[in-house]
Image (spheres, grey):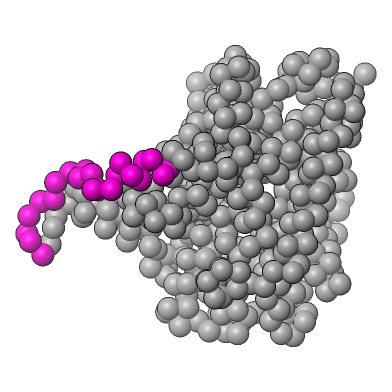
Amino acid sequence: MLWLLTVSWSLVSGYAVLQLCGISTRNLAADVALAWFCGTGWYTFASCVALFVLGLEPSLWESVAILAFPVATAVALRRRLQGGIQTSIVNRRTTRWWPWRYRWLWVAPAGMVVVVLSLVVLHAKNTPTNTDDAIRLRAHTPMLVYQGHLSPAARSAIFSNGSFMSFGPLPIWQLRGTIHHFDVNYFIVTNVVFLFALIYALCSSRGVPEQGLGTVFLLTTMPLFVYHAASTYLDALYGVMFGGALFFLALEAQADSEPYRRCVLLFVYLAAGIKHEGEIVAITTLTVFLVMLAARCLQGKRFPWRCVSMGVAPLVIYLVVKNVYSSNPLLVGAARVLEQYVGYDAPGGQTAIAAVAAPNSTLAWRIFWDSLFSSGNFGIVFYIFGIASVYYWRTILNRQLIWPMAALALVFAEVLINALIVNPQWTVDMTTVHRSLVAVAMGCAIMTGLLPDARTLGQRTGEDGCQLAD
């Protein structure tokens, strides 16, 4: 009950943030789902800055003030917000919650989504935080923040985990007055459920429920993602944020809409606050997004400086705080890789041979290939994605989907380089090879679901492939 109260608390605050940022969809279901990410994103950002910059220790009243601030601001500016409501995402569209062609065929996929999500929630509700190897770091850092342990080692662990996970479960613990391990699971699975709701509701509000149902169905066909959605590993969680960024990047590439741009930047920031891998994925996606906007300038369009600067500001502030109060292992790791492969070998005083292949690289590649196509961890998502990409290649080019495809390809390349060159030993012992592909698999599932547009589905469409209202 307290968890539902905390979720409602975040939704109210997030809905106010959503209105203040001008990204309302004018569809209640989509707005509620998006409000969760706005609310938790605002809370974790403000809490992190309050703790490390202002020196304010987390407390229940601080959480109340942080979550109430957007609501009070929205009330104070309600007249201005009512005047700007027309800049919403959804406009001139017919909301349809169920496909109009082959409608009975969609019953089985929809039923599977409901069953799988129910099992995920049940698993999260009944599996303690110490799922696999004692208390996971992912569940431990919120405890450090809650109890006020901020030693240099603790700060390093907190920022290694990321602000989103380290601060996200705090409100429910502050309400309870004690730590409850299951709340970490609840927090992760709640993000998964709201991503599913957001994708389906927004696609339905755009008149293409087939895209939404197809996307969430593909996501539930991946056993490893389903398992991680209810465990204290964070691979599924940063995959959720990368998937959200990719989803809105695909929509923005087609529609050239400022609200979509704001949503892309929202999910980029959220991804950066989850593990170091999330930071890499966020920066990669942001780079592709900025290149796409710059490329439009060649067509005579203006670069949206105001939108981008305001959207990137929280990410920059977070990265500055992270690097000031904790050494960034990404920079340390990059220096180690350069020293190992192309740099100066300090002990021997000799130059290392560039790109020396690890002795187990062949085995690492074989295991990586097996993880993609024959392990069963991701179902047949990679097969379907490859076939769909070839079949819809004209759609990818005509609808500017080459940009989200480029972001997905770059993230996959980063995972591949890490698995085969930087840390092949982790691939060989299967420590990370499978779960490192969770975010990539989620991106492939989302892009596959978005490739069939309304024209393919036999509907009358507008310029961005969405069904038009009669």
Q: Residue at x 33, y 44 (%)?
A: 363
Relative to 49, residue 18 above or below: above
Q: From the viewer's perspective, is 102 left or right of 383?
A: right
Relative to 234, residue 116 above or below: above
Residue 46: % across, % down: 63, 67
Front one among 223 and 151: 223
Front one among 385 and 86: 385
Front one among 10 and 77: 10
Q: From the viewer's perspective, is 48 left or right of 326?
A: right
Q: Residue 457's image quarter?
A: top right
Residue 142 seen anywhere in this rendered image of the structure: yes
Q: Which residue is drawn at 28% across and 48% down?
A: 360
Chain part drawn in magenta:
347-368
Is residue 363 in the magenta section? Answer: yes
Front one among 19 and 170: 170
Residue 356: % across, % down: 20, 45
